[in-house]
Image: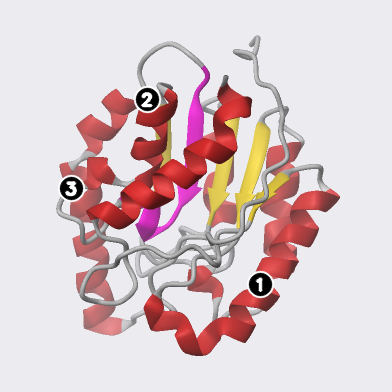
């Protein structure tokens, strides 16, 4: 299939990071309840998410966690991938699962990026944003998993932009670990010729849990992302 035409650009903006939700994966009854809540959120907005991927122009795809899912906003279509799509006037395909990451499976089981990346690439995106890492804070094996996901993506012919982990207020005591993860993801991204966007220093308002962006927070993230992608989808 002929690509829609993408011009690559190096992305480097201080102040944003991957997208995360849970630094621990719930188990037992609580985990099952959280999983059902996450899946219900996805089901409720499936049609609107699908409609957002329709239209002409370069296709922007985002694989991510609860940030990309827009959890806790009450308005999932206000999630930052759609904000970026609106600013850039391009269709958007979002594959998001709360609690997931490069290694983290989420409360819903086998949903880590390594298990989902082929489905996203099957959409034939012109630009792919890989936005995760926060949920991997307590997991080993980030570099190996990131190498598999980013390498597979960069080898597909799509333009790849890797985000660092986000650093919400609730993660103030994990600064050193987030810096370490940011360095790993940047190194892996560059080794595969992918662009890297450091969002770990980006400040944005969050909901009451201290982790998830509110609607205004998603607007800020989406506008930063759209600015970094403007040459890729132009």
Q: Which residue is mark 2?
A: 53
* Residue 119 visible to an observer of this rendering: no
Task: Give the CA separation, mark 1 to mark 2.
Answer: 31 Å
Q: How many numbered discs sit on the rendered protein?
A: 3
Q: Position of residue 48 (x, y in %)?
A: 22, 31
Q: Position of residue 170 (x, y in %)?
A: 38, 81
Query: Where is the C terminus found, in terms of image quarters?
Result: top right
Q: Secondary structure at mark 3?
A: loop
* N-term-proximal mark, 3 vs 2: 2
Q: Secondary structure at mark 2?
A: loop
Q: Position of residue 10 (x, y in %)?
A: 73, 40
What stretch of residues is rendered in magenta? Answer: 58-69
Which residue: 50% across, 23% down? 59
In the rendered image, the residue lying farthest to the bottom is 173
Q: Residues within 10 Å of mark 2 (few under 14, many from 20)?
A: some
Q: Within the image, what quadrant is residue 223 found in?
A: top left
Q: Kindly identify which numbered label has been placed on residue 181.
A: 1
Q: Which residue is mark 3?
A: 75
Along the line of sight, which residue is nearer the eye, 205 or 167?
Answer: 205
- Magenta residue check for 64: yes
Q: In the image, 99: left or right of 233?
A: left
Along the line of sight, which residue is nearer the eye, 100 or 108?
Answer: 100
């Amino acid at each position: 299939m002929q690509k829609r035409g993408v011009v690559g650009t190096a992305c480097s903006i201080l102040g944003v990071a991957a997208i995360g939700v849970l630094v621990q994966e719930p188990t037992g009854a609580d985990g099952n309840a959280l999983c059902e809540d996450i899946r219900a959120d996805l089901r409720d907005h499936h049609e609107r998410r699908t409609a957002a991927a329709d239209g002409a122009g370069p296709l922007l795809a985002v694989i991510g966690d609860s940030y990309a899912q827009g959890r806790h906003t009450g308005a999932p279509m206000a999630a930052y991938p759609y904000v970026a799509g609106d600013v850039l006037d391009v269709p958007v395909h979002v594959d998001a699962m709360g609690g997931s990451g490069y290694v983290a499976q989420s409360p819903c089981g086998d949903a880590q990026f390594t298990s989902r990346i082929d489905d996203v690439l099957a959409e034939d995106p012109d630009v792919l944003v890989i936005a995760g890492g926060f949920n991997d804070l307590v997991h080993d094996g980030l570099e190996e998993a990131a190498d598999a996901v980013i390498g597979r993506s960069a080898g597909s012919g799509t333009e790849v932009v890797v985000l660092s982990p986000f650093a919400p207020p609730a993660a103030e005591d994990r600064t050193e670990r987030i810096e370490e993860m940011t360095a790993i993801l940047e190194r892996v991204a560059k080794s595969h010729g992918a662009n890297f966007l450091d969002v770990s220093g980006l400040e944005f308002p969050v909901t009451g849990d201290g982790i998830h962006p509110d609607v205004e927070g998603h607007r800020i993230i989406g506008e930063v992302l759209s600015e970094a992608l403007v040459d890729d989808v132009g």
